[in-house]
Amino acid sequence: MQHSPTSKTRIIIQTNPKTLPYGEIVDIFYAAPAARESPAPVTPVAPAQPSQTFLQAVETRRSHYSITNTSPVPDGRIVQVIQHAITHVPSSWNSQSSRALVLFADEHEWVWDTVVNALKAITSGSKFDAAAGKVNASMRAGHGTVLFFEDDDVVKGLQSSFPTYKDDFTAWSEQTSGMAQFITWVALEEEGLGANLQHYNKLIEAEVKTHFNVPSSWRLVAQMPFGEPTAEPGEKTFQSIEPRVKVYGL
């Protein structure tokens, strides 16, 4: 249908007969053909790859040092996330050597008070003040803490059963723990929490085992305080990927 620059068409738009029983008359003015803009070209959107959601979660995982004693999700959900991570983390020979303590409230604060007391025994003055300030602001201030352990009895059992690989099982156990930490970290971030990872192992392990009645075979590997983040993490830079990933046969 052609229209002049000032042509006017009246069309009837049927509406609710209870309000406008004869329809509503709407005036529409058509612009001159020369004045009409061509539609902007549409850039095809590539279909999402099956792994994209997972990779995006990996990318958004960051170290958060500004966290509070609040959580956007119930504590029960946090426990479920950590249980799922420990259940499904890969391990050599399906050994399932990873262990974890999930701490809230006073027990969470106790861990970081213990860290501060341990630091006080080995530092003093401004060095202690700086270290204690960091612990209190970025760890104790959080909502909870995950303590990651590896069960050395499991490792020793594998060494006995598979002596050919005896020297490898400790390293493989560490790799399992690293994956458990990573899965937990990414999952907590997806739940709206921020976390960071600490390694005060030797300073607090004995007291932690006594306080929580932890089996002697459990070896403390890492501590992950978490809470609702109050600031964005700093900018992260990346090395060029070409010298880091080599591809052959493609």
Image (spheres, rainbow, N blue to C red):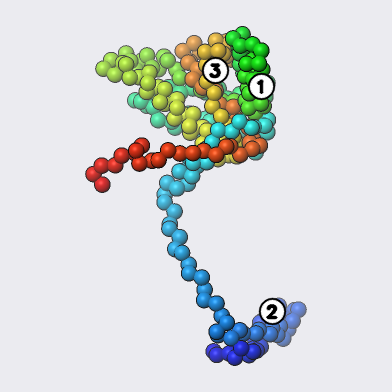
Mark in front: 1 vs 2: 1
Q: Is residue 221 above or below residue 210?
A: below
| Mark 1 residue type | Gly
Left or right: where 170 falls relative to 71: left
Q: Secondary structure at mark 2?
A: loop
Of pointers 1 and 2, the one earlier in the residue sequence: 2
User: Could you tell me residue 149's position as x and y percent?
Assistant: 49, 20
**How far, Cα to Cα, is label 1 from label 2?**
67 Å
Label ID, residue 133: 1
User: Could you tell me residue 174's position as x and y percent?
Assistant: 42, 22
Could you classify mark 1 by the number of other residues whose Cα lies within 10 Å: few (under 14), some (14-19), or many (20 or more)? some
Q: Residue furthest top?
A: 121
Q: Residue at x 35, y 25 (%)?
A: 92
Q: Residue at x 45, y 39 (%)?
A: 238
Mark in front: 3 vs 1: 1
User: Could you tell me residue 86's position as x and y percent?
Assistant: 48, 28
Could you classify mark 3 by the number of other residues whose Cα lies within 10 Å: few (under 14), some (14-19), or many (20 or more)? some
| Mark 3 residue type | Tyr
| Mark 2 residue type | Thr
Residue at numbered disc 3: 200
